[in-house]
Amino acid sequence: MARIFCVANQKGGVGKTTTCVNLAAALHLAGQRTLLVDLDPQGNATMGSGVDKRALEKSVYHLLVGLATLDEVRVKSESGGYDILPANRDLAGAEVELVNLDNREKRLRDALRAFDADYDFVLIDCPPSLSMLTLNGLCGAHGVIIPMQCEYYALEGLSDLVNTIKKVHANLNRELKIIGLLRVMFDPRVTLQQQVSAQLESHFGDKVFRAIVPRNVRLAEAPSHGLPGVVFDKAAKGAQAYMAFAHEMIERIKTI
């Protein structure tokens, strides 16, 4: 049975896509059968996986509106080793079209269900807004991974996201829970970041992942080569942090 995790944060620029791509590649390197679902119309996870979003015949848009099956949409990330449901600008149109479709919040969940036995992990990269696409991600997932920077504004946004997850849990998906918070772009030299990190550990306890992803130039460079950071430079501190995070995830699902 696949464990499905949504990587979400309503704040933009917090490393959701970087986390999705690198976690998917790290899980594959750890021997896990992994599927990455790109639910962001920008298609950054698609491009970061080495798939040309401009050359796609079918994308996750076609899956959501019922014009294709998952098997017709998924492609292999040659650079990362995992499967991906790619996205491009077509997906922006799904926001409007989904409104008039039956079971609109659960289209992704229903599509994934038929392929449950094919994967150990399914990771969903959500757009930075509470949209119909994000709602599909939350309704299709068993849990939410929240990447966040250790800054004051990030704490403000976190409370909004937690409330959203509680509402989805209460009304649409009783399985949904917060799996954990991942500290990203962390700079231990900044006192404020250390203080916010300590606050997170104090308030959320073991919901905060032990792995911490530092600010790392090599992770930022990797997408321009169409490679996950853990493949682009395995020795980089950021890559090693994501490998540690993947192993922590594998251990954590045993207790879920």
Image: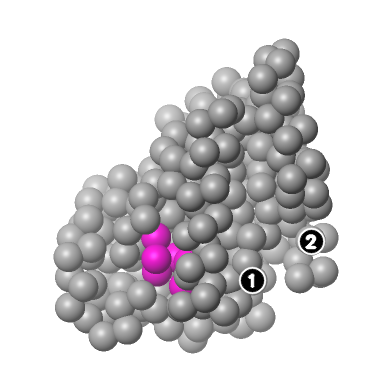
- Location of residue 51 in the rendering, given as x and y in whole percent from the top left corner: 39, 49
For residue 74, which quarter of the picture?
Answer: bottom left
Amino acid carrying label 1: it is Arg
Residue type at numbered disc 2: Arg
Query: In this picture, which residue range is highlighted in magenta?
Result: 134-139
Estimate how packed mark 2 is, as few (under 14), some (14 to 19) or many (20 or more) residues with alpha carbons within 10 Å: few
Going by the image, does 209 lie left or right of 74? right
Q: Is residue 235 above or below residue 98?
A: above
Quick one: SS at disc 1? strand
**Do the residues bearing badges 1 and 2 touch, measured as CB atoms within 8 Å?**
no
| Camera sees residue 11 | yes
Q: Which numbered dot is residue 3?
A: 1
| The quadrant where residue 130 appears | bottom left
Q: Nearer the viewer, residue 169 or 61?
A: 169
Residue occupying image coordinates x 63% and y 66%: 177
Q: Residue at x 50, y 25 (%)?
A: 221
Image mark count? 2
Q: Is residue 58 above or below residue 241?
A: below
Q: Is residue 158 left or right of residue 207?
A: left
Q: Position of residue 37 (x, y in %)?
A: 45, 61
Q: Quadrant of residue 176?
A: bottom right
- Residue at 54% x, 48% y is 159
Circle 1 packing at 10 Å, graded few (<14), some (14-19), many (20+), is some
- Give the quadrant of the N terminus: bottom right
Residue farthest top in this picture:
189
Front position in the image: 197 or 245: 197
Spatial distance from mark 1 to mark 2, Cα to Cα? 11 Å
Is residue 24 shown to the viewer in this render?
A: no
Magenta span has 135? yes
Query: What residue did someone put label 2 on?
Result: 252
